[in-house]
Amino acid sequence: MDVSCSTSPDDPGNEPCWQFTRCESPPLLCSELLFKFLIVGEFGVGRFSPTYKITIGADFSLKQLRWNRTTKINLQLWDIAGHERYGYMTRVYYKYAVAAAVVFDVSRMETFQLAHKWIQDIREKVSLPDGSPIPIVLMANKSDLTDGIIQTDVISRYCREYAIGAWFITSAKENVNIDEAMAYLVEQVLEMKAVEATKDSIVLQEPNALDASSTSSPLNRFILNEKPCGCG
């Protein structure tokens, strides 16, 4: 077997794994995927864009993940938390999102009490093609500043009441549990993708098509590119 790069994502000295040259057995297909995630919440709950590579302005950022040997994921993060000027435009910003994080400040009870407003807003304005709600995670932010005044059992009960799959204590400033929360959402979306794939509804897109304004369904825009990446 003759290959041109390592399969290890941890070795920066090697080329990406989807550039294998020749295999004795049929090669694996590496997929490059695009997901649009929302980050919403009240003013002052914390900014998440500095955690990632900012590309255009302060409200849109991009994070690239090597999920596994055959999957590379591009996350578009639309962070409109605390921007009241977006109040009448959320439907535009929500369009084609496949997951969301609702953020509150653990030291400010009012931001927790208002989280349901964002949950309801998301569920009213964006859904999956089959009409089901997009996955939402709750993020209790600013853990670096305080132990918080909101008890964990209260948050857990809140998540059950509003059908939120998971919640995380986070610090955007110190990057605590941010990646874990995003990984949870990615897992949820990948499960949806697998279900949709069984319906033969996922189509290939052109490489680097990072265009959230496309008119196609989000579940039909998962795969940006597929190339041989290894040996079976």
Image (tube, rainbow, N blue to C red):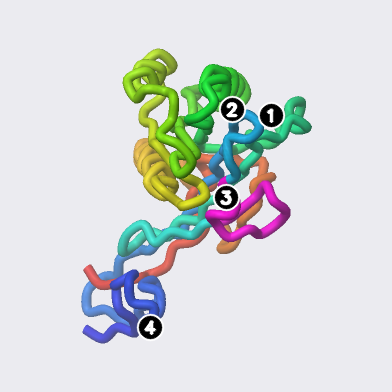
The reply to whether the C-beta atoms of the residues labelled 2 and 3 are less than 8 Å apart is: no
Where, quadrant-wise, is the C terminus in this rendering? bottom left
**Mark found first going from the N terminus, 4 or 2:** 4
Task: Look at the numbered disc 1 and give the secondary structure of its residue.
Answer: helix
Circle 3 residue? 76
**Mark found first going from the N terminus, 4 or 3:** 4
Decide if residue 102 is on the left or right side of residue 2.
right
Circle 4 residue? 13
Task: Look at the numbered disc 3 and give the secondary structure of its residue.
Answer: strand
The reply to whether the C-beta atoms of the residues labelled 1 and 2 are less than 8 Å apart is: yes
Task: Look at the numbered disc 4 and give the secondary structure of its residue.
Answer: loop
The magenta stretch is 48-62
Q: Amino acid at mark 4?
A: Gly
Residue nearer the viewer, 189 or 131: 189
Distance, label 3 to label 1, CA atoms, is 17 Å
Distance, label 2 to label 3, CA atoms, is 16 Å
Distance, label 4 to label 3, CA atoms, is 26 Å
Decide if residue 133 is on the left or right side of residue 91.
left
**Mark found first going from the N terminus, 1 or 2:** 1
Circle 1 residue? 91
Distance, label 1 to label 4, CA atoms, is 43 Å
User: Residue 221, relative to residue 207: is it above or below?
Assistant: above
